[in-house]
Image (cartoon, rainbow, N blue to C red):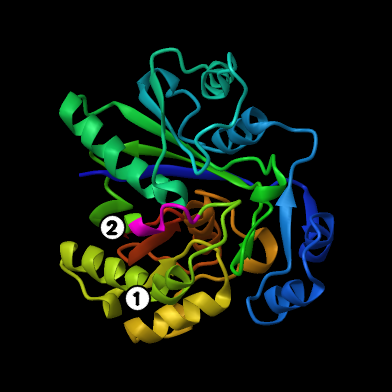
Amino acid sequence: MTALLDVGCHLPDTSVDIADIGASIGTDDSLMRTFRRFYGLGSVRRAPGQDVRAILTAAATNLTELRGNEDRVRYVIAARTVATVATVGERPVEDVCAALGLTNAVVFTLTQHACAGGLLAVRLAGELLDADGDPAALALILVGEKVFSPTLEMIPESTVMGESTAACLVTAGGERDRLLGYATRTIGRYCEGFPPFALDPDFLKDHNELLAGVMRQACRQAGLDVADLALVLPHNVNRLSWSWTCRLLDIPLARVFLDNIPVTGHCFTADPFINYIHARAAGRLRPGDPYLMASVGLGATFSAAVLRH
């Protein structure tokens, strides 16, 4: 049974107001006011002077279960929103593994699901570990990226991007945070919907219904109803979008952990994992609670995973 053994995250120290980010790329002030007033956005965390290696290593270093178990890590999977994050000849994920002392792992990246790639990585890691048949083996998933281009500063009409990161250890036989159901759907007609392209108006219209449908599908696979979920751990796009999705699902918005939207913004693939850590610390998850992680990747892929704490 695929399960999360441990989850760690890293929120950089520098907090940047979204108005300053908008001004830096010439965004109209009225859009930033809309982001703040209606979307619930406020600031994001950035890591000036640090590259992607540093911020991913920082998240993995916060995994308490990794220390002393480095030799058990069979796979390291970097789930990326942006396929290319380094120049030719650079190997940032291999450098992270070297810094962490992971010498026995098969290392690779996962792309094409954009910000939904982290949930795919959990599913894939479990399948790889199960096929290996070694109950002691682990997989390490790394998520989160740098905003290295003006086109990555924000998603039009949607959100502002941050540089917080997360890491999780996956096991094939854990007793808690077990994966009960996973569903994903890619709508290829929106394949041009990644910056610098403008978002297709139909994507904005269909987004919430498609996301709600995938969430229902993941719950059905887990043998649950959406109403059975103790908590939803979202991608931090914006509060307004989640309010519409909750109406479609007929669940209260309070069931969605939205605390990080004004603090971290949208952090590429890392949001659900960061939210897991903060929700657990806030007492929002109790042993035995079923919960759902959800994320949408431009392109467009809609994914949801149901787990039991």
User: Judging from the image, what secondary structure is the residue with disc 1 in?
Assistant: helix
Residue 69, image x, y percentages: 42, 24
Quarter location, residue 156: bottom right
Residue 2, image x, y percentages: 25, 43
From which residue to which does the magenta span run?
Answer: 189-193
The residue identified by callout 2 is 185
User: Judging from the image, what secondary structure is the residue with disc 2 in?
Assistant: strand
- Could you tell me which quadrant the N terminus lies in? top left
Quarter location, residue 188: bottom left
Kind of residue at badge 2: Arg
Q: Is residue 258 visible?
A: yes
The residue identified by callout 1 is 209
Residue 149, magenta (yes or no): no
Q: Nearer the viewer, residue 250 or 302?
A: 302
Residues packed near mark 2 inside 10 Å, few (<14), some (14 to 19) or many (20 plus): some
Q: Is residue 297 left or right of residue 156?
A: left
User: In the picture shown, does residue 198 fall above or below 202?
Assistant: above
Residue 284, image x, y percentages: 47, 69
Q: Identify which residue is drawn at 35% across, 84% down.
A: 248
Q: Nearer the viewer, residue 135 or 213?
A: 213
